[in-house]
């Protein structure tokens, strides 16, 4: 079995949050493979833990990707402030001629793959395109570790995530896929406030999850537990109707949202202030300006850092993207590579420390973090869609006994998708088109 087929069989997807099936991404020949260990979001410690404790696994996975893509060079991207991790990784690659380090400043969003490719290689990805356009592949360090496991015949059944905030024991947790959010929080000692709210992911790009029975998936990077009256909770809970009302009342067209937008600074034709102008005033804006909301990475800098009126171009862009998708409208974005603004990108890097202050989360970043907390759930509810593409097809029936690692969901024939495996040993108690429940 070849490398890419093995990765496909073991159900590896992008662990950075997007969930793109890795076997598809690696089915191309490139020049450079970038291992993303920059940990873009504040309050997340997954990449730091993996590189510190399991860095050699990452290196082995990177070597597999280099072989699969025929790449000549592997580059591990890290924050230069993580001096201990940098030295540790250097020791792992001392004898690797084609693997090197790229050390980045502590800015947001350093981990965005389009920003990362430019910062590491100097190559600008044209708008609407992927890193492969400029001969690169970007893989999160946990994805690379999962690739290493795949080569050993181990499918993806666990997820490294950070559980932090108003919890008794903030931890980097090795969670079984399918265990509930509530179970993970309980493993971390439970909550410290009444009426807690959980943000899934990071504080910038994460979303509020009200149902704590929601299962952990392959793409969940963090659980941030906050009081219900926290600034960040109120910001993320704001209904779209109120976002538009605020914008109509207060948007002064200062253009700061555009001037600090990382994608605009890469030369992409994304102008958040023009989109806001259309939403606010209904002016005759060319349709491509609105359609270019699809270029938005939803990093959130516009709403958290740029806008002096505390408005949310990010939410407006998200609403437009969802609306276009629901209408099954897929405009063709013009292939452009305008590098005239890239020098401004280098000069407008927003320090993560400033982002933490704006989010009012610095007190949680000072907490002592436990690492490598193992879990032992008695029940898992495993979604059959944890990836970009089609829902996997269940291949087990109610009453079946399965071992951890057994295949429970197969990729539909001819479709983009990823396999799904049992994360504990036990009996299958429910199977439908959306999930498989296993009790240990």
Image: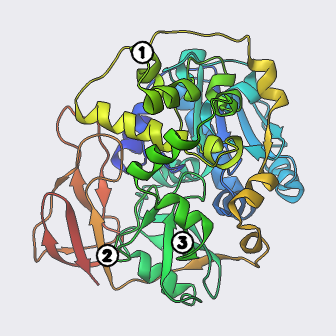
Residue 27's place in the image compared with 177, above or below, is: above
Of mark 3 and mark 2, the one earlier in the sequence is 3
Q: Which mark is residue 88?
A: none
Q: Residue at x 80, y 32 (%)?
A: 348
Left or right relative to 261: residue 158 = left
Residue 94 rendering spot, x and y as whole percentages: 85, 43
Residue 332's place in the image compared with 259, above or below, is: above
Asked whether 350 or 43 is in front, the reply is 350
- Which mark lies nearer to you, 2 or 1? 1
Of mark 2 and mark 1, the one earlier in the sequence is 1
Residue 367 rendering spot, x and y as whole percentages: 76, 77
Asked whether residue 185 appears in the rendered view, the answer is yes
Asked whether residue 295 appears in the rendered view, the answer is no
Structural crowding at the residue carrying mark 3, measured as other residues with C-alpha within 10 Å and reported as few (<14), some (14–19) or many (≥20): many
Residue 281's place in the image compared with 307, above or below, is: above
Residue 239 rendering spot, x and y as whole percentages: 40, 55
- Which mark lies nearer to you, 1 or 3? 1
Q: Would you name the residue on which mark 1 appears?
A: 284
The secondary element bearing badge 1 is classed as loop
The secondary element bearing badge 3 is classed as strand
Structural crowding at the residue carrying mark 2, measured as other residues with C-alpha within 10 Å and reported as few (<14), some (14–19) or many (≥20): many
- Quadrant (top left/top right/bottom left/bottom right) for the C terminus: bottom left
Left or right relative to 18: residue 380 = left
Q: Residue at x 30, y 56 (%)?
A: 420
Q: Which mark is residue 174?
A: 3
Residue 83's place in the image compared with 183, above or below, is: above
- Quadrant (top left/top right/bottom left/bottom right) for the N terminus: top left
The secondary element bearing badge 2 is classed as strand
Q: Would you name the residue on which mark 2 appears?
A: 380
Query: Are the two marked residues, 1 and 3, in contact with CB atoms closer than 8 angstroms?
Result: no
């Amino acid at each position: 079995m070849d490398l890419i087929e093995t990765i496909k069989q073991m159900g590896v997807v992008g662990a950075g949050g997007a969930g793109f099936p890795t076997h598809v991404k690696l089915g191309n020949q490139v020049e450079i493979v970038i291992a993303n260990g920059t940990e873009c979001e504040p309050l997340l410690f997954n990449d730091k833990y993996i590189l510190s404790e399991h860095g050699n696994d990452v290196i082995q996975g990177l070597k597999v990707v280099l072989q699969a893509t025929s790449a000549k060079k592997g580059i591990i991207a890290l924050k230069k402030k993580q001096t201990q991790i940098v030295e540790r990784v250097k020791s792992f690659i001392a004898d690797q001629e084609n693997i090197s380090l790229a050390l980045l400043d502590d800015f947001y969003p350093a981990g965005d793959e389009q920003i990362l490719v430019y910062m590491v290689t100097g190559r600008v990805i044209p708008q609407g395109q992927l890193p492969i356009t400029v001969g690169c592949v970007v893989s999160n360090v946990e994805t690379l570790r999962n690739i290493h496991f795949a080569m050993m015949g181990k499918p993806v059944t666990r997820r490294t995530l950070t559980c932090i905030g108003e919890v008794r024991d903030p931890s980097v947790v090795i969670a079984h896929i399918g265990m509930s959010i509530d179970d993970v929080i309980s493993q971390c000692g439970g909550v410290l406030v009444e009426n807690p709210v959980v943000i899934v992911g990071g504080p910038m790009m994460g979303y509020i999850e009200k149902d704590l029975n929601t299962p952990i998936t392959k793409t969940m990077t963090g659980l941030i537990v906050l009081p219900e009256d926290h600034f960040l909770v109120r910001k993320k809970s704001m209904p779209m109707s109120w976002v538009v009302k605020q914008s109509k009342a207060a948007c002064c067209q200062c253009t700061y949202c555009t001037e600090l937008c990382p994608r605009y600074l890469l030369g992409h034709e994304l102008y958040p202030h023009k989109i806001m102008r259309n939403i606010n005033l209904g002016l005759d804006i060319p349709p491509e300006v609105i359609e270019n909301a699809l270029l938005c990475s939803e990093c959130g800098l516009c709403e958290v850092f740029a806008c002096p009126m505390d408005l949310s171009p990010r939410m407006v862009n998200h609403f437009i993207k969802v609306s276009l998708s629901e209408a099954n409208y897929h405009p063709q974005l013009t292939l452009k590579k305008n590098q005239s603004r890239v020098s401004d990108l280098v000069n407008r890097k927003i320090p993560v420390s400033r982002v933490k202050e704006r989010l009012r989360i610095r007190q949680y970043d000072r907490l002592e973090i436990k690492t490598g907390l193992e879990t032992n759930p008695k029940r898992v509810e495993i979604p059959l869609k944890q990836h970009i593409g089609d829902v996997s097809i269940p291949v087990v029936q109610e009453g079946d006994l399965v071992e951890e690692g057994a295949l429970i969901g197969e990729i539909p024939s001819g479709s983009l998708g990823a396999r799904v495996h049992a994360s504990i040993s036990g009996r299958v108690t429910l199977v439908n088109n959306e999930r498989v429940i296993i009790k240990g």
